[in-house]
Structure formats: structure tokens, C-alpha cells
Image (cartoon, rainbow, N blue to C red):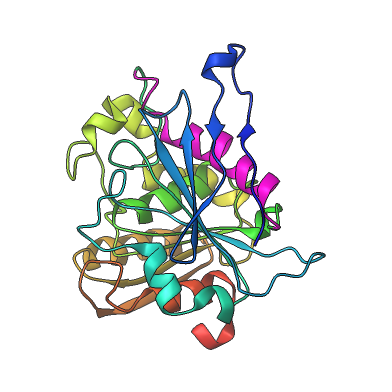
């Protein structure tokens, strides 16, 4: 195990607003750090799952398991627990990271509320901390995003808004064709229709198509509730000549534990056995 220390990451001039991240506690094999920052309300967490065998000179890919609920809510299951149950951290020799958020995560910055800056928190607190504290590959190819539903939206929007930061993003059963804020608790996070447009997946695809290159960086796999949304986004990406992986099914229950995570991880890591 890696002994993590308290790390203060100065992102603003005022020292009392600098993020603070605690040493890890081991919770059933998952390392859990408590975090405070000006970008979230109260205490959030950064959870890390390491392969059992670590080599000092080795850098591991990092898959960011993006939650769909605020704080430690688990109505739809627990993403990192599913990864651990299936031993994917050892099978793929990969470090998995799951941050929590104080509000329902849509991976956006609210235009007025400084405590709902989810995108900034992820980019300026979570990523720097993980890359300073753990032996992860800090190139875009080593930063991979995994999500479903709201966090599938988040995975695609983060990559499209920051194609120079992230290498690949997979979404399972996500409302990717949403064209206005309001549904699924999204309005309190996006704040205004104008701010929502900055994160709207269909518009980001049109704007960023030429920056995505020739490899399959966006992955769409299976469905529970949002098959039509995936079909329509697949068609749009074809129209825009955006290389992507697409799997239509099988239909599964809309949660972390219905069997889709293992395929998603394999595709993110470009493991041909996951095809």
C-alpha cells in the first residue's frame, strides 16, 4: 500500500479556501480519503482501489468510476464495490478511483453557486491529488472515464470538453440526447439553459468532432432505460464520422451490478477480449 499524506493543493489565493485531503483509511480494501474544497459543500471523498501487487517503477492506467448519486447514496449500487467484487483491478492491473460529490453529479459547474463546481473539483482537485499520490499514468491515455446514466453523460461531456486531458470514456444506459435541463435532477446543477448548452453532448460532438482523432475514444454499450438515446447518438456520431464503439444490448437493470461493468472496463483498456 502507498502511504498517503495530507496534501494541500493551492487553487485559490486564500489559504483557508485551499482544498485539504486527509490520509487514507482502509475500508475493506478500498482506500478512502476525506476532502474539503471551495468547489464542494462540506466533506467529500476520494476512494482508491489498487492492484494487490504494485511495482515501484510501474505506472498504472487510472479508471475514474463516476458516481450517479450524491455523497454515499447507493440506491443504484456502488461502482467501486462492483469493480472489487469482479477483481478487475487485479485482472487488468489498473487503479480505480471513485470521487464523491456533495450534490447530484452532472459533472458541470453551476454558473453562480461556488459550491457546485463539479467539473472544476474533478479536474483541479481529484486528478492532481490522485496523480501526485498514486502511481498512475498521467497522460491522456492513462486517464479513463466510466459511467452510466448521469455519470455516463458526465464521462462523455468531460472527454468532449477536455479531449487533451482524457483518453477514453464509456457510457452505459445514459440520457445522452437530453436537449434541455430539468429532467433527472439536472436543473439545480446546470442552473440555466445557457449553461446547460456548454455541456450538451450533441452540441459538443458537433464542435469537437475534428479534435477526437481516428481512434475509438467514445464508447456506448448496452442499455436499461435509454436504448433510444444510445441509438440516436450512435447515428449522430456516424453522421459526424466520429469513430466510436457501439454495443446494442443486452438489456440489463439500471444499476451498477447488472453485469455491464466488466465489458466497459475491458473496452476502456482496449482489451480485445472485451469485444
Residue 132 falls within the magenta-colored stretch: yes
Q: Residue at x 52, y 41 (%)?
A: 161
64 up-or-down from 189: above or below: below
Residue 41 falls within the magenta-colored stretch: no
Q: Nearer the viewer, residue 232 or 6?
A: 6
Left or right for 261, reference 190 = right
Image location of residue 100, percent across then percent down: 39, 45
Question: Over which residues does the magenta segment extend?
Answer: 113-135
Q: Nearer the viewer, residue 109 or 134?
A: 134
Q: Residue at x 46, y 23 (%)?
A: 38
Q: Nearer the viewer, residue 85 or 179?
A: 85
- The chief SS type of the magenta part is helix
- Count the marks: how many? 0
Image location of residue 89, percent across then percent down: 55, 73
Q: Residue at x 37, y 71 (%)?
A: 82
Q: Residue at x 56, y 22 (%)?
A: 18
Amino acid at each position: 500500500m502507498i502511504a498517503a499524506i495530507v496534501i494541500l493543493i493551492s487553487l485559490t489565493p486564500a489559504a483557508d479556501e485551499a482544498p485539504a485531503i486527509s490520509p487514507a483509511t482502509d475500508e475493506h480494501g478500498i482506500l478512502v480519503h476525506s476532502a474539503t474544497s471551495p468547489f464542494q459543500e462540506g466533506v467529500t471523498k476520494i476512494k482508491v482501489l489498487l492492484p494487490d501487487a504494485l511495482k515501484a517503477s510501474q505506472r498504472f492506467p487510472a479508471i475514474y468510476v463516476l458516481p450517479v448519486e450524491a455523497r454515499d447514496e447507493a440506491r443504484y449500487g456502488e461502482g467501486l464495490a462492483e469493480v472489487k467484487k469482479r477483481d478487475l483491478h487485479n485482472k487488468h492491473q489498473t487503479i480505480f478511483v471513485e470521487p464523491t460529490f456533495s450534490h447530484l453529479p452532472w459533472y458541470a459547474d453551476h454558473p453562480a453557486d461556488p459550491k457546485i463546481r463539479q467539473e472544476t473539483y474533478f479536474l483541479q482537485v481529484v486528478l492532481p491529488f490522485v496523480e501526485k499520490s498514486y502511481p498512475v499514468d498521467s497522460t491522456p491515455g492513462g486517464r479513463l472515464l466510466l459511467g452510466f446514466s448521469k455519470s455516463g453523460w458526465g464521462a462523455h461531456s468531460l472527454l468532449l470538453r477536455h479531449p487533451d486531458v482524457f483518453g477514453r470514456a464509456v457510457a452505459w444506459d445514459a440520457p445522452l440526447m437530453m436537449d434541455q435541463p430539468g429532467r433527472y435532477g439536472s436543473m439545480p446543477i446546470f442552473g440555466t439553459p445557457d449553461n446547460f448548452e456548454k455541456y450538451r453532448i450533441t452540441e459538443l460532438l458537433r464542435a469537437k468532432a475534428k479534435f477526437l482523432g481516428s481512434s475509438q475514444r467514445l464508447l456506448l454499450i448496452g442499455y436499461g432505460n435509454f436504448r433510444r438515446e444510445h441509438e440516436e447518438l450512435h447515428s449522430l456520431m456516424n453522421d459526424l464520422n466520429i469513430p466510436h464503439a457501439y454495443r446494442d444490448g443486452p438489456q440489463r437493470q439500471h444499476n451498477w451490478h447488472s453485469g455491464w461493468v466488466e465489458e466497459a472496463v475491458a473496452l476502456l483498456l482496449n482489451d480485445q477480449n472485451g469485444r
